[in-house]
Image (cartoon, grey):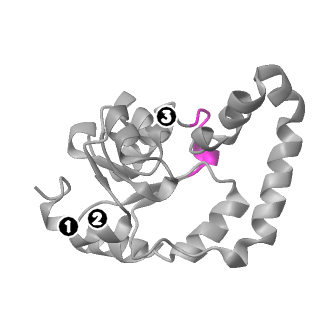
Amino acid sequence: MHRAIGKGSGKLLATLLGDEDAERVGDEAKELHSRFYLETAELLRPFDRAPELVRTLAGRGVRVVLATSASPDELDVLRKVLDVDDVVDGIVSGEDVEATKPDPEPVFAALEKAGTSPEDTIFVGDAVWDVHAAAKAGVRTVSVLSGGVGAAELTDAGAVAVYDDAAALLDDLDGSVLFS
């Protein structure tokens, strides 16, 4: 199950259950996930220094677009927890795309919102599926280990750099591929 995290919910369920069973229980599983997520939302906290990373990037003129496959209710919770709406240039959610990671459609939607080209964009993510989706869109990926995937796996997938977490990326920002 852990290896499927980072895919959109439909693809995650298909990976775990097979297409037929995922179709049979998909809506119920998504509903139960959403209900549990919202019931436990008060437990959510941003990753260490993640809001500061987003604010620093935006303050340096980087167009920041957040991309998630979260449902509208879950996205509302995430936005409150991260508290960076005032500095982001856009948000791409599951409502904005038909296909989810590892399909590149969410990355293409984020590129459109940012108004940037793939070669001038860097995707920051924490799952192998982030790296695959970005690569299919022609975008380089910097990965962080908060997704529970090892550095070697992310590098093998194509990440150009891997950091322990958002705080480590922020600490090395000037030396990172984001600004070198």
What's the CA distance linking mark 2 and mark 3? 26 Å
**Of 105 and 113, the residue lying toward us:** 105
Q: Secondary structure at mark 1?
A: loop
Residue occupying the point 20% across, 66% down: 173
Q: Secondary structure at mark 2?
A: helix
Give coordinates of residue 70: x percent, y percent: 64, 53
Which label sits on residue 105? 3
Which residue is under mark 1? 172
Give coordinates of residue 50: x percent, y percent: 41, 71
Is 97 drawn above or below residue 52 in the view shown? above
What's the CA distance linking mark 2 and mark 1? 5 Å
79 to the left or right of 61: right
* Amino acid residing under circle 1: Asp
Which residue is under mark 2? 169
Q: Is the magenta region chiefly helix, strand or loop?
A: loop
Q: How many marks?
A: 3
State yes or no: discs 2 and 1 in contact (Cβ < 8 Å): yes
Of callouts 2 and 3, the N-terminal one: 3
| Residue 46 painted magenta | no
Residue occupying the point 24% across, 72% down: 171
**Of 3 and 65, the residue lying toward us:** 3
Magenta range is: 93-100
* Amino acid residing under circle 2: Leu
